Amino acid sequence: MPAALELKDVRKSFGKTAIINGVNLAIEQGERHAVIGPNGAGKSTLFNLVSGRFPLSSGNIFLNGRDITGMAPNEINRQGLARSFQITNVFPKLSVFENIRCGLLWSTGHRYAFWKRVAGLREVAERAQEIVEMINLGRRRDTLAGVLSYAELRALEIGITIAGGADVILLDEPTAGMSNTETADAVALIRSVTQGKTLVMVEHDMSVVFGLADRISVLVYGQVIATGTPEEIRSNKAVQEAYLGTEATEEAE
């Protein structure tokens, strides 16, 4: 079985500045994988390369064994990869249910003009309702997204991301800006909605990373300096020196 996501000697430069320097990484089917590293390490750039927002300077990216290098973001999404963004990406004047329904329709190739006729699409409505319940926003089904709390917005964003049925999910800082209680709820939600899927996330909160990830890759100056289980990463001297430090290591224990 091919890896869910594989990067082979991926490089990206902006002008003469190299941001990603020969990343090789294979993430298995059904794995929860975290990419960590200091600010400026290239984590967001790497996500932009994988999701097709930036072209590669060189190298190849494979999704479920298929070369997706050079594909547009919407083509990559059709191949089974969905990405959420650090900046919440919802329609504030639509309800929770309508936002999820939009995500479903967009993933199936329908354009905005078609949405006027969507009320009659029973299957879409039923699936949208399932996702609303899955992300624990059933009580907020008809609430406009613009008045949701920050944590509820992030839950809605995750719902939109999974709406299309993608089997590889990229989450960018899913718990950023949350309280401890909100973070715990978000982790439980992410664990639930990614059952049977492959999750790749960028996350700064080490308690989230060590609690959720099966494996972790550490990116420093555009290079993966280590990949391993949480225990292996926690005890890796090179990682501690380059990024984690004793404070973060103790916090995660």
Image: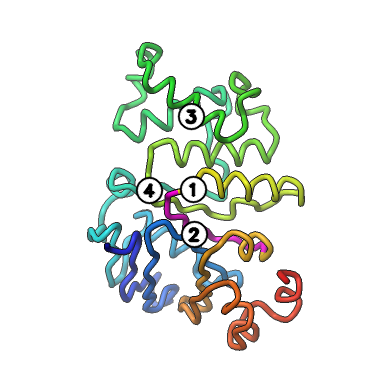
Tell me the CA gap for discs 3 and 2. Answer: 24 Å
Quick check: marks 2 and 1 in contact, CB under 8 Å?
yes
| Dot 4 or dot 2, earlier in sequence | 2
Q: Is residue 234 left or right of residue 169?
A: right
Quadrant the C terminus occupies: bottom right
| Dot 2 or dot 1, earlier in sequence | 2
Quick check: marks 3 and 4 in contact, CB under 8 Å?
no
Query: Which of the 4 image quarters holds residue 141?
Result: top right
Q: Amino acid at mark 2?
A: Arg
Residue behind mark 1: 194
Residue behind mark 4: 167
Task: Please name the residue shown 63% across and 47% down the image.
Answer: 188
Tell me the CA gap for discs 2 and 1. Answer: 8 Å
Q: Position of residue 73 (x, y in %)?
A: 33, 48
Residue behind mark 2: 32
The answer to whether 160 is drawn above or below residue 207 in the figure is: above
Q: Position of residue 92 (x, y in %)?
A: 58, 28
| Dot 3 or dot 4, earlier in sequence | 3
Query: Which of the 4 image quarters holds residue 2?
Result: bottom left
Task: Please name the residue shown 65% across and 59% down the image.
Answer: 208
| Dot 4 or dot 1, earlier in sequence | 4
Residue behind mark 3: 100
Q: Secondary structure at mark 2?
A: strand
Q: Secondary structure at mark 1?
A: loop
Crowd around label 2: few <14 · some 14–19 · many ≥20 (10 Å):
many
Quick check: marks 3 and 1 in contact, CB under 8 Å?
no
